[in-house]
Image (cartoon, helix red, strand yellow):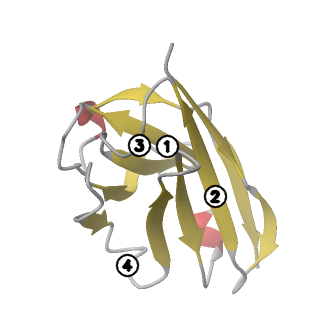
């Protein structure tokens, strides 16, 4: 059974950094596109970043471009989201997701079929 487990969330001051991890089991991140999404209280889920199955294409929401970086470690079967220069607007539950095999990745959450349980990120001002 496929599982995605996020970790690395927490409380950080504005301007600080966090690195989120998404450990995959049951499938290898080397053949699936992976994405990060977030949902703030009272808001809809929104796209944050994605990476294609081969790692050659990355996508970012305009709100995080230049501050966040998505990457993966094939050996550890893990996808990361490095978040720098955090601000209170980044406060949300962050979810990782996996798409269909050999996909190019997408900003559309409907293109992902497996989701993690989420990890809370809180940025204080």
| Label 3 residue SS | loop
Q: Give me the C-alpha separation between circle 1 and circle 3.
A: 12 Å
Residue 96, label in figure:
1
Expressed as whole percent of the image width and height from the top left, the position of residue 67 reads 49, 82
Q: Give me the C-alpha separation between circle 4 and circle 1.
A: 18 Å
Q: Which of labels 2 and 3 is toward the front? A: 3
Q: Quadrant of residue 56?
A: bottom left
Q: Quadrant of residue 51?
A: bottom left
Q: Residues within 10 Å of mark 3 (few under 14, many from 20)?
A: many
Give the residue pinned by disc 2. Answer: 20
Considering every residue shown, the one lying at the far front of the view is 75
Q: Residues within 10 Å of mark 4 (few under 14, many from 20)?
A: few
Give the residue pinned by disc 4. Answer: 65
Expressed as whole percent of the image width and height from the top left, the position of residue 65 reads 37, 78
Tell which of 63 and 5 is nearer to you: 5
Expressed as whole percent of the image width and height from the top left, the position of residue 26 reads 49, 23
Expressed as whole percent of the image width and height from the top left, the position of residue 6 reads 64, 42
Whether residues under marks 4 and 3 lie with C-beta atoms below 8 angstroms apart, the answer is no
Whether residues under marks 1 and 2 lie with C-beta atoms below 8 angstroms apart, the answer is yes
Q: Which of labels 2 and 4 is toward the front? A: 2
Give the residue pinned by disc 3. Answer: 29
| Label 1 residue SS | strand
């Amino acid at each position: 059974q496929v599982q995605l487990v996020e970790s690395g969330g927490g409380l950080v001051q504005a301007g600080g950094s966090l690195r989120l991890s998404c450990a995959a089991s049951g499938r290898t991140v080397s053949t699936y596109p992976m994405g990060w999404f977030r949902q703030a209280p009272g808001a809809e889920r929104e796209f944050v970043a994605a990476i294609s199955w081969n790692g050659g294409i990355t996508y970012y929401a305009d709100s995080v471009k230049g501050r966040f970086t998505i990457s993966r470690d094939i050996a550890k079967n893990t996808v990361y989201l490095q978040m720098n220069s955090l601000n209170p607007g980044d406060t949300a539950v962050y979810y990782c997701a996996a798409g269909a095999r050999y996909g190019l990745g997408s900003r559309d959450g409907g293109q992902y079929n497996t989701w993690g349980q989420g990890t809370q990120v809180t940025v204080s001002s």
